[in-house]
């Protein structure tokens, strides 16, 4: 089977039309159309349903897509290996992350060792990051929680306490540290259901029998921060994610009863990929330096 035709199939499927797929490959639309037609004729299958100018993958096309994606990744890795003799003088690393915190730190450490590698970052929620890894859209993922799935390899990068932050006019703003019990009856702004920070905080509150007054659920760190600045309630955030502001006061929870963690993820079947292994090694070294700095 021609890898050229599979590459064309993948481009057309990704971009949703023969013309867009052809442009992505740098070939003409008739060439792309002919290659798909030959592929369909050779194997007596229909890969796309043509609905006017719109294309939809057929059942066979949907089954072929993940295989073509894997072959595309393998082809790219073979090309990089042959071109650069395994020295990672060039290449592309695609990263998915739930937020900018830590991933930029990881990238900085990696670029110090491999400055020739082109890096792109896609930000999304945990489900999106894992789906992108599974579909070969990204190479590695940076998430704030541990997901028990044998399809993925995981490495702990960092652990960090969850802190409170309040408007400077709030009564708790005069304290640098408070016990978790100080949240009893307090107006608490919560992140969305599924947020790692919220899950960790809710677990600790339940264990210590503390019941705050939940006033609002907010789906982004930026909106949560703005609501706290306006005095609507208290917020909770990973210490690594807190951005100082003259209107805000960060408050440590005594004994650090709430902790979140940052993990590096990649597909187990891609563990031998040189570019993934090099990123894992660089982030492992950065994690060790972070732990040493924290200890001192």
Image (cartoon, grey):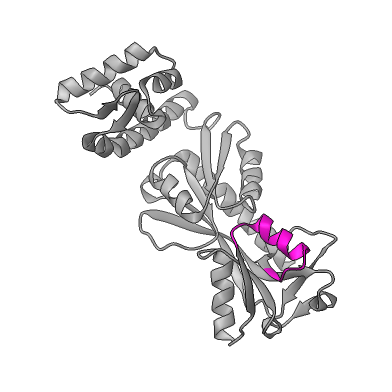
Depicted 28 relative to depicted 55: above or below: above
Tell me where residue 255 appears, x and y as whole percent.
68, 80
Relative horizontal placement of residue 90, taking residue 189 as reference (left or right): left
What is the total number of numbered labels drawn onto the structure image? Answer: 0
Q: Position of residue 71 (x, y in %)?
A: 33, 33
Rendered residue at 66%/76% (across/down): 256
Residue 23, picture quadrant: top left
Whether residue 62 is in magenta: the answer is no
Residue drawn where x is 33% and y is 12% of the image:
31
Q: Is residue 227 magenta?
A: yes
Q: Kindly indicate the quadrant of the structure image that contains residue 144.
A: bottom right
Q: Is residue 296 visible?
A: yes
Name the residue at 47% across, 41% down.
Answer: 138
Where residue 104 appears, as percent x and y from the top left, is 65, 47
Residue furthest to the bottom in view is 209
Q: In the image, is 108 to the left or to the right of 248?
A: left
Q: Is residue 270 left or right of residue 254?
A: left
Q: Which residues are magenta?
A: 218-235
């Amino acid at each position: 089977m021609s890898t050229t035709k599979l590459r064309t199939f993948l481009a057309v499927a990704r971009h949703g039309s023969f013309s867009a797929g052809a442009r992505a490959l740098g070939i003409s639309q008739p060439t792309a159309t002919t290659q798909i037609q030959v592929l369909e004729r050779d194997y007596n299958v229909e890969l796309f349903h043509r609905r006017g100018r719109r294309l939809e993958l057929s059942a066979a096309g949907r089954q072929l897509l993940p295989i073509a994606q894997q072959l595309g990744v393998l082809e790219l890795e073979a090309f990089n290996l042959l071109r650069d003799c395994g020295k990672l003088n060039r290449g592309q690393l695609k990263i998915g992350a739930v937020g900018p915190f830590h991933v930029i730190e990881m990238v900085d450490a990696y670029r110090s060792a491999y400055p020739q590698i082109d890096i792109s970052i896609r930000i999304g929620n945990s489900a999106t990051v894992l789906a992108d890894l599974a579909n070969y859209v990204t190479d590695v993922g940076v998430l704030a929680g541990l997901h028990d799935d044998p399809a993925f390899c995981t490495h702990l990068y960092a652990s960090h306490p969850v802190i409170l932050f309040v408007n400077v006019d709030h009564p708790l703003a005069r304290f640098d540290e408070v016990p978790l019990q100080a949240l009893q009856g307090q107006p608490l702004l919560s992140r969305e259901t599924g947020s790692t920070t919220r899950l960790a905080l809710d677990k600790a509150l339940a264990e210590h029998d503390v019941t705050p007054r939940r006033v609002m659920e907010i789906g982004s760190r930026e909106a949560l921060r703005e609501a706290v600045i306006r005095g609507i309630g208290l917020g909770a955030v990973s210490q690594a994610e807190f951005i100082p502001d003259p209107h805000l006061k960060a408050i440590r929870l005594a004994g650090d009863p709430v902790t979140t963690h940052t993990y590096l993820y990649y597909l187990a079947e891609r563990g031998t990929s040189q570019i993934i292994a090099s990123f894992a090694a660089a982030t492992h070294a950065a994690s060790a330096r972070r732990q040493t700095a924290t200890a001192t």
